[in-house]
Amino acid sequence: MRTALGLRAHSGWAALVALGETRGALEVILRERLALVREEDAHWAGQPYHAAEGLLPEDARDVVARGIDSARALAAQEVRAAKERVTARGHEVAACAVLVGDGMPDWSVDEILRVHFRMHKAEGELFRDALSRASGACGLRLVSIPEKRLEAHAQECLAAPAAQLAQRIAALGRAAGPPWGKDQKQAALAAWAALHTS
């Protein structure tokens, strides 16, 4: 069964849904929470810019760099492991959809730390970027979907109205069982759209 991974990032973790499709029939192959920070580093690595606030510039840049490197390494490890679990069940992983933000100016760490809202924005981008890079590192075709445009993008790709797509996603949740909240619904819809994105 052709399958795509759908990923929705948070600070320090991501929701993953692997969705398979055969002749229009959909199936949740895998549903997981991926760790993007190590448990022992969670007190700082989930928000490395906040952890760097108030430090000397060189120390702050070091904390942020370590946080970014750690997130990228863990994202690659987690996405690779998820891909292997899907293929071990006999499915081909055709793509990886990552819900992305609006992007960010090319601010330096110093510029980000000077304005608090930039720290939140940078941390959101950090984990989305780590997942996007992980997709490529695992040899998967990356489909970046702006989170704010997910519904419109899915309607275009799947040639179906929003209400119909929502019904199909809700039915998947009933079949898969809980948890099936916003994270899982959006990850599943992104994965489904990725299967139909050339």
Image (tube, rainbow, N blue to C red):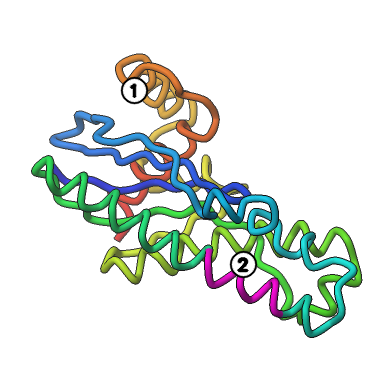
Circle 1 sits on which residue? 172
Q: Is residue 128 above or below residue 3?
A: below
Q: Earlier in the sequence, mark 1 or mark 2?
A: 2
**Quadrant (top left/top right/bottom left/bottom right) for the C terminus:** bottom left
Main SS category, magenta section? helix
Q: In the displayed structure, would residue 18 be above or below residue 78?
A: above
Query: Where residue 43 sits: x, y (%)?
Result: 69, 51
Foreground residue, 9 or 19? 9
Quarter of image, res 173: top left
Which amino acid lies under the numbered mark 2 shown in the image of this protein?
Gly
Farthest-out residue, front:
40
Query: Looking at this view, is 141 or 120 the one in front?
Result: 120
Identify the residue at the far left of this view: 90
| Residue depicted at 19% across the width and 29% down the height | 25
- In magenta stretch: residue 64: yes
Residue extent of the magenta highlight: 62-70
Q: Secondary structure at mark 2?
A: helix
Query: Outermost residue, bottom direction?
Result: 58
Residue closer to the observer: 46 or 178: 46
- Camera-nearest label, 1 or 2: 2
Q: CA distance from mark 1 to mark 2?
A: 35 Å
Q: Position of residue 161 (x, y in %)?
A: 45, 31
On the image, the x and y values in percent for residue 186 come to 49, 37
Can residue 111 be seen in this snapshot? yes
Asked if residue 166 lies in the magenta stretch, the reply is no
Which residue is painted at 52% across and 40% down in the image?
151
Q: Is residue 155 visible?
A: no
Q: Is residue 167 left or right of residue 100?
A: left
Q: Which mark is residue 67?
A: 2
Vertical placement of 8 versus 112: above or below?
Answer: above
Residue 65 position in % (x across, y down): 64, 76
Asked if the residue under mark 2 is in contact with the one under mark 1, i.e. CB atoms within 8 Å, the reply is no
